[in-house]
Amino acid sequence: VTDWLGNSRTTVSSGRFQVIHDVLAPRTTLTVGDPKFVRNSDGVTFVSSSTPLTFTAVDDLVASGDGAGLGVDLIEVSIDDGGFFVVTQGVPITLGSKGVTKEGKHKVAFRAVDSVGNPEAERFSILYIDLTAPVTTSAQTPVPNTNGWNNTDVSVNLTATDPALADASTAGSGVKETNFSVDNGASVIGTSTPLVSQTVNTVEFFSTYNRRNVEAPHR
């Protein structure tokens, strides 16, 4: 190699080297921890404000799924179309830790960027917070007289419903179970009980919905 002034230098070989072309963006996965409930009929996922949400990303090189990319630089998350913020891979966050505690529908968007700047297209999951407990009502058969008394055996039947979410985005997560006790006895799961003793009976009952919150007991 010679410059304009005639200075020359013998070419030195640097040896073999490899050029790596990382052309694919990372792939981010959201894992929803407990407590949660996934409704079988439509796949709707109910969570609480303390449910852990964990984001992990894998970087591909030249084929989707090869996992051989140069690495993930960062993962960003947005809640309810707010600004994106960076999260640590594998370290859970909660909706509550970001000030999101309101009952209803919540959008969790996420994306990642790899070490050479390839950006992942934004993806999102819809999660629902259900804070409203079920409503359980009782009816007795046969119905009592005008003074509230029966002179035959009585069957008490319990009916529980779970109201729609406050923002009307979907139905509630559904009733998981109904419990009752008679005369301060042990609590049992069921929706009907016979009363045969010739005295005043007290039936206490409540229901639990699928997101695990419990209704206050009734009598």
Image (spheres, rainbow, N blue to C red):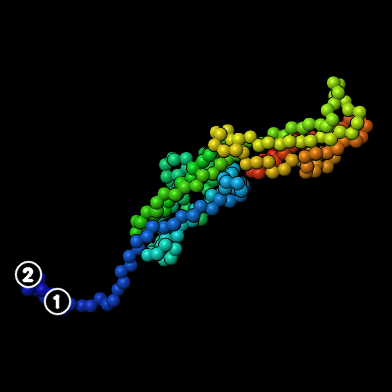
Q: Quadrant of the C terminus?
A: top right
**Horizontal relation, residue 26 to residue 163: left or right:** left
Snapshot quadrant of residue 114: bottom left
Residue closer to the observer: 73 or 124? 124
The x, y position of residue 79, in whole percent, is: 47, 42
* Residue for point 64% across, 43% down: 211
Q: Is residue 148 visible?
A: yes
Give left or right: position of 17 versus 100: left
User: In the figure, residue 188 lies in which quadrant?
Assistant: top right
Amino acid residing under circle 1: Arg
The amino acid sitting under disc 2 is Trp
Distance between mark 1 and mark 2 Cα atoms: 13 Å
- Which residue position is annotated with label 2? 4
Dot 1 crowding, Cα within 10 Å, few <14, some 14–19, many 20+: few
Residue 36: in sight, yes or no? Answer: no
| Mark 2 neighbour class, 10 Å CA radius: few under 14, some 14 to 19, many 20 or more | few
- Outermost residue, left side: 5
Residue that numbered label 1 is attached to: 9
Residue 195 place in picture, x, y as percent: 87, 35
Identified at 83% across, 28% down, the residue is 143
Secondary element under disc 1, as helix, strand or loop, is loop
**Depth order, front residue of 115/159:** 159
Q: Are marks 1 and 2 in contact (CB under 8 Å)?
A: no
Callout 2: helix, strand or loop?
loop
Provide residue 64's location: percent of width, then percent of height: 42, 62
Q: Tell me the residue at 56%/34% (across/down).
A: 168
**Of the image marks 1 and 2, the number of the one nearer the N terminus:** 2
